Every structure is written in C-alpha cells, then in structure tokens.
Image (cartoon, rainbow, N blue to C red):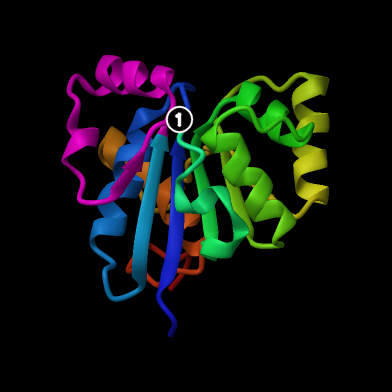
C-alpha cells in the first residue's frame, strides 16, 4: 500500500473533540501515512481551547501551516496530497468551497483537492441545516466531495463522550481509505 499524504483542516465550528481524536488516530497510523499537513482557523484554536480546555493542538508532530500560508505544499496540486479532511467543517467554510472562493489556505486546499479529483471529506457540524447549507452540500458532493455529518452511531455502546465522538472519527478514517481497528456492525 502506498502511504497517503493527508491534509487536516480544522475550522471554528463546535466539535474540537473530533479534530483532536482524528489527530490522535493519525499518529497511530505511521505505516499508512507519509505526511500530515494541518491548518487551523483562528476560531478553531479558540473553540479547541474553550471546548477541550487546553492548547494541545501544538503538541502533534505534524506539519502545521497558518491559515494564510499559500506557500504550503498542498496549496498546489503538484504536491499530490491524496485526501483532505475538514473536521469540523463550518457552514461558512463549506459555502466558500461550494462557490469557489479560495480566500485562505483551507478553502484553497479544498479547491485544489476537488480540481485534482482527489478525496475531500467535510465533517459538517451544524444543525439544523438551512436550504443554503443543503444546496452547498449538494454542490460540494456534485464536485466530488464527501459530506460526512458529525452524526455519531450508538450500536457500539459507547460509554463516554470520547467514545461517542470516536464513532464519527472512525467513519472518517474509513472514508479516507485508511485501515484501522474499530467496531464493525455485526462483525
């Protein structure tokens, strides 16, 4: 199996736990991953501090880029990143992606991934959805993206909030094409 190059974008939507658990999981898969590039919006850092009570996003041994760093390798298709995961994905970010507005590194990287016909996974974390949200999700889906709402499953009988959130992260890891040990229905 060829190792993957993955972009993780974290926006300011509520749900920092999903981003943390994904970064934790990716650290456990070095045999499948060549490189992880991370970009966080300013609001994402604030939400992480508020919801998780720390700034541990600085502790991961990944390549971090500022939200306006258009020199990041994944700002171009020539860097050949395979997959982009936006977790959580705010509806504002999704709207900019759907309309082709590349005004920061997150939206530029998403534009690159879509134009190169690679895998974009947007873990949307809003409820309820307005018709604008639904139309933006439709547009991104028609462009080749995958909308993966942060809807947890409960058939694994999760016992903590982390286990509930992990059900979403496990699904994202599957969608990214990475192998993992996780609960499988009736397996």
Q: Is residue 154 visible?
A: no
Q: Which quadrant, please, contains the N terminus?
A: bottom left
Q: In this rendering, would 61 be left or right of 167?
A: left
Q: Nearer the viewer, residue 17 or 165?
A: 17
Q: Is residue 95 visible?
A: yes
Q: Nearer the viewer, residue 102 or 152?
A: 102
Whether 81 is drawn above or below 156: the answer is below
Q: In this rendering, would 6 be left or right of 139?
A: left
Q: Position of residue 37 (x, y in %)?
A: 38, 50
Q: Residue at x 64, y 24 (%)?
A: 91
Element at label 1: loop
Q: Magenta span has 44?
A: yes
Residue 106, quarter of the rendered image: top right
Whether 167 is drawn above or below 123: the answer is below
**Crowding near the residue tagged with mark 1, few <14, some 14–19, many ≥20 C-alpha atoms within 10 Å:** some
Whether 124 is drawn above or below 30: the answer is above
Q: In this rendering, would 39 be left or right of 52?
A: right
Q: Magenta span has 75?
A: no
Q: Residue at x 33, y 16 (%)?
A: 46
Q: Nearer the viewer, residue 2 or 185?
A: 2
Magenta residues? 40-66
Q: Which quadrant, please, contains the C terminus?
A: bottom left
Residue furthest out toward the bottom: 1
Q: Position of residue 122 (x, y in %)?
A: 59, 42
Q: How many marks?
A: 1
Q: Residue at x 33, y 22 (%)?
A: 45
Q: Position of residue 147 (x, y in %)?
A: 66, 44
Residue 35, quarter of the rendered image: bottom left
- The residue that disc 1 covers is 67
Q: Position of residue 177 (x, y in %)?
A: 50, 69
């Amino acid at each position: 199996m060829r190792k993957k190059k993955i972009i993780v974008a974290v926006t300011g939507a509520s749900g920092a736990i999903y981003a943390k658990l994904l970064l934790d999981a990716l650290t456990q898969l070095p045999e499948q991953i060549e490189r992880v590039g991370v970009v966080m919006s300013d609001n994402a850092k604030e939400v992480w501090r508020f919801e998780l009570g720390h700034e541990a996003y600085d502790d991961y041994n990944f390549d971090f880029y500022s939200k306006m760093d258009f020199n990041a390798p994944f700002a171009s298709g020539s860097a050949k990143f395979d997959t982009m995961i936006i977790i959580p994905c705010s509806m504002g970010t999704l709207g900019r992606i759907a309309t082709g507005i590349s005004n920061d590194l997150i939206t530029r990287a998403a534009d690159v991934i879509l134009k190169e016909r690679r895998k974009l996974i947007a873990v949307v974390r809003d409820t309820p959805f307005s018709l604008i949200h639904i139309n933006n999700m439709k547009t991104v889906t028609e462009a080749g993206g995958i909308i993966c709402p942060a809807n947890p499953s409960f058939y694994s009988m999760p016992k903590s909030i982390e286990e509930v959130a992990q059900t979403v992260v496990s699904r994202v890891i599957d969608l990214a094409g990475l192998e993992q040990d996780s609960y499988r229905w009736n397996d």
